[in-house]
């Protein structure tokens, strides 16, 4: 069997940065007043169960991402994950006396600033993304709502939702379109076309991370060389799921797995298998999958 890796895959810059900040915080957590040093993350640090399990074993405690049910965090380190958080939660953490470690992806920070700026000018904001994703919630929370003159926020997950929004008449002619950083480039383009027909004053910021587009392009090139593709990553990861959906459309056999133990027998019967991985997948997990394939499934 030949196992071929995608040319671009695995940790993106934002995730790598968040993981490094978490490792530094855990390494530096010193006992205080006879108690172990405390390190928290605001929501799961990344969408990868292997990494999360390792961090929890080292003492990282996950808090609710919406800020509800905070324990006493005075003097503790609280990491803001790459998705970012809301201004309200950030203020509550600071008032509670936490040491806030902001690992928000710089690209997410830019979208937050754009939403605040353009909503403050009275523009409606349309975010192309997953409605319940932490990043989208974070970005939307920066809107400065002005009910009489715009500044509202709408989230659309596909072109059909964008068409319904446009047809409903509630969208201002002055609006801004931005995207979740891991959103599908093809779907973003379809949404843009729909909204540009409706709103003459639309401003478009393609805020999709270049790493997302590079992974999609690398996946397309990989598909031309293999009979099947294994997508490695957390099943709750939006960008990993999109890689998997794309892989299914490109090759006869594709699967999304979180670790090597989930490899299906069908892959061991292929001559050429491709591997790609989501932006939250560490190299060690990818290597374990690669080795299991090369060993023919033997442990």
Image (cartoon, helix red, strand yellow):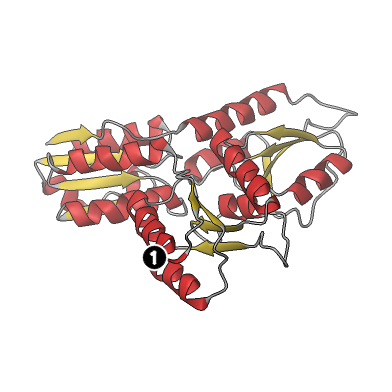
Asked which quadrant contains residue 58, the reply is top right
Residue 188 vertical placement versus 223 (above, below) = below
Residue farthest to the left?
271
**The residue positioned farthest toward the right in the image shown:** 33
Res. 221 image quadrant? top left
Residue 95 position, x and y percent, is 88, 42
Q: Is residue 66 above or below residue 282?
A: below
Residue 274 position in % (x across, y down): 20, 40
- Tell me the crowding category of disc 1: few under 14, some 14 to 19, or many 20 or more residues within 10 angstroms, Cα based: some
The C terminus sits in image quarter: top left
**Looking at the image, which is closer to me, 106 or 121?**
121
Q: In the displayed structure, does residue 187 sit left or right of residue 151?
A: left
Q: Is residue 5 visible?
A: yes
Let me know if residue 82 appears in the view: no
Instruction: Report the residue at 17% width, 53% height from top.
Output: 266
**Relative side of 288 to 183, left or right:** left
Classify 241 as above or below 271. Answer: below
Residue 259: percent from left, percent from top: 37, 44
Q: Nearer the viewer, residue 167 or 132?
A: 167
Per the image, the residue denoted by label 1 is: 159
Residue at the bottom extreme of this rendering: 168
Q: Residue at x 50, y 55 (%)?
A: 202
Residue 279 screen position, x and y as percent: 43, 39
Residue in front for this viewpoint, 101 or 207: 207
| Residue 213, image quadrant | top left
Label 1 sits on a secondary structure element that is helix
Count of marks, rendered view? 1
- At x 57%, y 53%, the residue is 136
- Which quadrant would the N terminus be assigned to in this image? top left
């Amino acid at each position: 069997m030949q196992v071929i890796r995608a040319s671009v895959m695995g940790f993106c810059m934002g995730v790598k940065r968040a993981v490094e900040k978490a490792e530094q915080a855990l390494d530096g957590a010193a006992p205080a007043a006879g108690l172990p040093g405390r390190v928290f993350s605001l929501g799961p640090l990344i969408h990868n169960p292997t990494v999360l399990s390792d961090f929890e074993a080292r003492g990282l405690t996950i808090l609710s991402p919406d800020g509800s049910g905070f324990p006493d965090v005075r003097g503790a380190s609280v990491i803001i994950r790459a998705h970012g958080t809301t201004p309200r939660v950030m203020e509550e953490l600071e008032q509670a006396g936490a040491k806030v470690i902001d690992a928000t992806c710089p690209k997410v920070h830019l979208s937050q600033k754009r939403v605040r700026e353009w909503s403050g000018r009275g523009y409606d904001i349309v975010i192309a993304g997953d409605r319940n994703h932490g990043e989208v919630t974070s970005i939307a929370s920066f809107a400065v709502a002005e009910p009489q003159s715009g500044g509202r926020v709408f989230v659309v997950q596909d072109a059909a939702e964008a068409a319904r929004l446009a047809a409903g008449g509630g969208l201002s002619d002055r609006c801004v379109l931005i995207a979740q950083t891991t959103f599908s480039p093809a779907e973003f383009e379809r949404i843009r076309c729909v909204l540009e027909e409706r709103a003459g004053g639309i401003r478009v910021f393609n805020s999709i991370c270049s790493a997302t587009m590079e992974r999609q392009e690398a996946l397309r090139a990989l598909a031309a060389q293999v009979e099947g593709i294994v997508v490695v990553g957390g099943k709750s990861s939006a960008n990993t799921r999109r890689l998997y959906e794309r892989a299914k459309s490109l090759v006869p056999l594709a699967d999304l797995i979180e670790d090597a133990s989930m490899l299906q027998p069908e892959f061991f019967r292929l001559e050429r298998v491709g591997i790609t991985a989501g932006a939250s997948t560490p190299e060690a997990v990818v290597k374990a999958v690669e080795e299991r394939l090369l060993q023919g499934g033997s442990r």
